[in-house]
């Protein structure tokens, strides 16, 4: 039954993420919001809602390891699995002009999370600082990005603001219910198999909340939309740390951090993010062979966690 809940949670998270993003795009267009602003705010937040839902549910249930592990694991999955898949499909060959900015922002966010891990807590004030950094990043990106950098396809939602609002609400309900199912199932699996919540967060929960990004990446690769995945992955990783953990810390009154994360997992996240950021900042292309190595490395990391 726990595995059924996990699978149902995955399906609801993916469906809800797609529905809420598409509905929000129509609302923004009807309100004459610039496409660039849609890309940097609504779409980015929409694809990160599964992580937010899981983190809030975990903290509310006094399971902070699932929240922290979910974000760290999701960042590793975004870089190694999602970006690796994009590279294998040829969708990361032309990352675009904003990639250096996004790579620097991702590494800055990662270093702040490193500091929080060694402090042993993400306090409410630290969470507020994270959100300030997030807003500053979006403002800076909006001011310094060309309009062509964030082209968004037409939505399948009818061009009616009432219908779009209803669809967006339905998407939100799907996401929160999916997070509830995923947390309940993952916790049950951890208990029955004697696996720690931190490991479940780093693997099962992280993979589940990264599925929307993976789905977008595969579609981008099949449609030949080069570079779509790179910016999405870097921005998503920054959003996970600043936005998800920042909001969760504010609402939950702070998040305690397991000292065990400092021994291995934070360094895995920094290593994988740092290697990709270094390649992008150096102007190197992330080719198919590199992508294959990244996906293989992610599989080995998952195997190591459970062994």
Image (cartoon, rainbow, N blue to C red):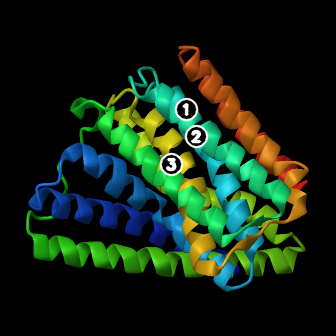
Q: Which numbered disc, 2 or 3, marks the residue that appears first in the sequence?
A: 2
Q: Is residue 7 visible?
A: no
Between marks 2 and 3, how big is the CA–CA gap? 9 Å
Q: Quadrant of residue 168?
A: bottom left
Q: Quadrant of residue 290?
A: top right
In the image: residue 301, left or right of residue 287: right
Q: Are marks 2 and 3 in contact (CB under 8 Å)?
A: no
In the picture, which quadrant includes the N terminus? bottom right
Q: Which numbered disc, 1 or 3, marks the residue that appears first in the sequence?
A: 1
> Residue 99 placed where, x, y %?
46, 28
Q: For numbered disc 2, what is the local secondary structure?
A: helix
Q: Are marks 2 and 1 in contact (CB under 8 Å)?
A: yes
Residue at 53% of width from left, 68% of height from top?
Answer: 52
**Label 2: which residue?**
106
Residue at 14% of width from left, 56% of height from top?
Answer: 29
Q: For numbered disc 1, what is the local secondary structure?
A: helix
Between marks 2 and 1, how big is the CA–CA gap? 5 Å
**Label 3: which residue?**
236
The crowd level at tag 1 (other Cα within 10 Å; few <14, some 14-19, many 20+) is many
In the image: residue 245, left or right of residue 49: right
Q: Nearer the viewer, residue 48 or 303?
A: 48
Residue at 53% of width from left, 14% of height from top?
Answer: 283
In the image: residue 115, left or right of residue 230: right
Mark on residue 103?
A: 1
Which of discs 1 and 3 lies nearer the camera? The answer is: 1
Q: For numbered disc 3, what is the local secondary structure?
A: helix
Between marks 1 and 3, how big is the CA–CA gap? 11 Å
């Amino acid at each position: 039954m726990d595995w059924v809940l996990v699978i149902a949670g995955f399906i609801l998270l993916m469906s809800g993420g797609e529905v809420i993003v598409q509905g929000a795009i129509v609302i923004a267009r009807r309100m004459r919001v610039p496409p660039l602003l849609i890309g940097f705010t609504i779409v980015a937040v929409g694809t990160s809602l599964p992580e937010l839902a899981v983190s809030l549910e975990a903290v509310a249930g006094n399971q902070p390891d699932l929240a922290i592990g979910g974000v760290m694991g999701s960042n590793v999955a975004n870089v190694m699995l999602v970006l690796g898949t994009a590279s294998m499909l040829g969708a990361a060959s032309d990352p675009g002009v904003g990639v250096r900015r996004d790579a620097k922002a991702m590494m800055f966010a990662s270093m702040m999370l490193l500091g929080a891990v060694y402090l042993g807590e993400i306090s409410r004030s630290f969470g507020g600082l994270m959100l300030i950094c997030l807003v500053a990043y979006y403002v800076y990106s909006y001011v310094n990005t060309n309009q062509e950098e964030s082209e968004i396809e037409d939505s399948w939602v009818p061009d009616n603001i009432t219908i779009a609002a209803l669809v967006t609400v339905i998407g939100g309900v799907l996401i929160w219910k999916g997070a509830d199912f995923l947390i309940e199932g993952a916790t049950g699996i951890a208990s029955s198999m004697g696996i720690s919540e931190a490991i479940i967060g780093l693997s099962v929960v992280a993979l589940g909340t990264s599925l929307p990004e993976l789905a977008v990446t595969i579609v981008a690769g099949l449609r030949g939309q080069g570079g779509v995945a790179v910016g999405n992955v870097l921005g998503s990783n920054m959003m996970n740390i600043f936005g998800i953990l920042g909001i969760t810390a504010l609402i939950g009154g702070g998040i305690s951090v397991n000292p065990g994360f400092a021994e291995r997992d934070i360094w895995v996240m920094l290593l994988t993010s740092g290697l990709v950021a270094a390649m992008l900042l150096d102007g190197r292309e992330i080719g198919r062979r590199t992508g294959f190595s990244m996906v293989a490395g992610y599989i080995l990391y998952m195997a190591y966690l459970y062994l």
